[in-house]
């Protein structure tokens, strides 16, 4: 199956299906058309759904109406990529060397949903497919999947299924896993203004307020010395981590040296009493993701910045109220800025997190198959990231979900030289083949 998979991946990765830039609209359309034709060639009923966002590819294959139906999710849109950003090869060509496949989308997410596509195509050909199968392949995940819940309601009959399968993540410490939780997420941009334009630092320095300095002072108050978030009320609604959750996270192998090699960081920070995976998967956080103020070009302009802009990414427990935490942050900003500083706070890309039960037949089957393929007991993993479709499936379709990340931890998702280890691809194909033939 590996040769067939490689052929499928090479054909799909060549499309520059970048959803964050409208200049790639034609590539988006070509990608959807390519996938529709691919499914139709293999006996699926397939269509492209045109709607308010980028088109969705919907495909269905019925083996026997009495069999359970699995809805498989994936997304064909990818992050931007330019070879000048550090790629060793053309990011939109599949390249294999040193035991890895390279290319934009080879892991996130074209290469992962193609694992299931390749396995199911093979099982159909052999007459061994044990489930009815549907695919929902969207083109807007990298931009937030906005409105997808409404589409699921509108197309309810087509996407109706007994359970869903999603592979859109990384294994941890080379251990197979089932993801059972995601944090909520929202992004916020804070613009702070102290003057109508930048001011001459010689003529006004020492008397005029400095937007960069005021922003720095505010940012310095967000975290306490023990690395907890110091915004009053930030932890409201966050549940206590259970002993069972702590024990499950302690099963994940953790090597500080490997973490340093993976990230280049010289240490890691956590609230007192929490291990690495509990902090990342089950505790809320706010991260400064961008900071801009003043002149950043060559040399010096010697002026006092009148404006400073900071961007934040909030990750919350599923039980927390996004609007309430946002209100707490607004209040924190207002109370900690001087009267001579004006501010504007905008919010974007909100998505609620979720915790999923593992006590259903489909998850239990997946755990057994993963263990047989990897010869390791799988982990139940709380993921610190967010995947909006998982919440949409739970709230709109109310079906069990099997979330099986297939990628290597050093895949460089969203970065230059995104890669998928070939041995991970082979194990993914074996997992998918065994699961869908049971």
Image: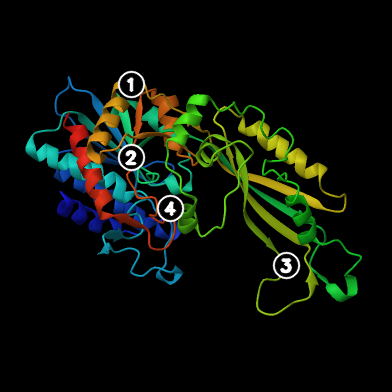
Residue 360, disc:
1
Label 3, label 1: how far apart the Cα atoms are: 55 Å
Horizontal side of 289 relative to 170 (left or right) equals right
Q: Which label's residue is closer to the chain start, 1 or 4? A: 4
Crowding at dot 2, Cα within 10 Å, few <14 / some 14-19 / many 20+, comes out as many
Residue highlighted by disc 2: 176
Q: Residue at x 33, y 39 (%)?
A: 176
Label 4, label 2: how far apart the Cα atoms are: 30 Å
> What is the quadrant of residue 161 in the picture?
top left
Residue highlighted by disc 3: 294
Label 3, label 2: how far apart the Cα atoms are: 47 Å
Horizontal side of 334 relative to 55 (left or right) equals right
* Label 3: element kind: loop
Q: In front: mark 4 or mark 2?
A: 2
Label 1, label 4: how far apart the Cα atoms are: 35 Å
- Residue 341: percent from left, percent from top: 83, 53
Horizontal side of 263 relative to 101 (left or right) equals right
Q: Is residue 160 visible?
A: no
* 270 vs 217, nearest the viewer: 270
Residue highlighted by disc 4: 19
Q: Which label's residue is closer to the chain start, 4 or 2? A: 4
* Label 1: element kind: loop
Label 1, label 2: how far apart the Cα atoms are: 18 Å
Instruction: Please say if 99 is above or below 121.
Output: below
**Residue placed farthest to the left in the image?**
126
């Amino acid at each position: 199956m590996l040769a067939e998979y490689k052929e499928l991946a090479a054909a799909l990765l060549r499309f520059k299906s970048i959803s964050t830039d409208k200049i790639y609209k034609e590539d988006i359309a070509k990608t959807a058309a390519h996938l529709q034709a691919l499914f139709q060639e293999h006996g699926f009923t397939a269509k492209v759904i045109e709607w308010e966002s980028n088109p969705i590819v919907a495909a269905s294959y019925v083996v026997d109406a009495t069999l359970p139906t699995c809805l498989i999710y994936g997304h064909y849109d990818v992050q931007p990529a330019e070879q000048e950003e550090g790629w060793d090869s053309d990011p939109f060509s599949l390249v294999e060397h040193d035991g890895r496949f390279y290319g934009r989308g080879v892991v996130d997410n074209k290469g992962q949903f193609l694992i299931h596509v390749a396995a199911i195509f093979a099982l159909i050909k052999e007459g061994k497919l044990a489930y009815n199968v549907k695919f929902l392949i969207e083109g807007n995940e990298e931009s937030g999947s906005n409105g997808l819940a409404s589409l699921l309601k509108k197309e309810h009959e087509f996407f109706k299924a007994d359970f869903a399968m999603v592979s859109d993540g990384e294994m941890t410490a080379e251990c197979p896993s089932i993801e059972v939780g995601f944090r909520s997420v929202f992004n916020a941009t804070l613009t702070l203004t102290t003057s109508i334009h930048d001011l001459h630092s010689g003529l006004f320095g020492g008397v005029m307020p400095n937007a960069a300095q005021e922003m720095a002072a505010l940012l310095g108050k967000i975290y306490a010395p023990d690395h907890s978030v110091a915004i009053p009320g930030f932890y409201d609604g966050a549940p206590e981590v259970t002993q069972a959750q702590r024990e499950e996270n302690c099963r994940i192998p953790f090597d500080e040296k490997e973490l340093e090699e993976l990230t280049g960081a010289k240490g890691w920070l956590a609230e007192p009493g929490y291990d690495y995976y509990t902090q990342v998967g089950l505790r809320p956080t706010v991260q400064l993701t961008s900071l801009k103020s003043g002149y950043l070009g060559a040399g010096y302009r010697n002026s006092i910045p009148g404006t400073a802009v900071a961007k934040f990414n909030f990750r919350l427990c599923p039980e927390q109220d996004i609007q309430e935490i946002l209100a707490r942050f607004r209040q924190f900003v207002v109370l900690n800025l001087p009267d001579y500083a004006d501010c504007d706070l905008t919010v974007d890309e909100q998505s609620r997190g979720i915790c999923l039960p593992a006590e259903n037949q489909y998850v239990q089957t997946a755990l057994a198959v993963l263990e047989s393929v990897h010869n390791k007991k799988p982990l139940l993993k709380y993921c610190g990231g967010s995947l909006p479709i998982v919440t949409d499936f739970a709230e709109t379709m109310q079906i069990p979900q099997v979330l099986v990340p297939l990628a290597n931890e050093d895949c460089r998702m969203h970065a230059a030289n995104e890669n998928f280890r070939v041995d991970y691809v082979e194990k993914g194909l074996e997992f998918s083949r065994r699961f869908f033939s049971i």
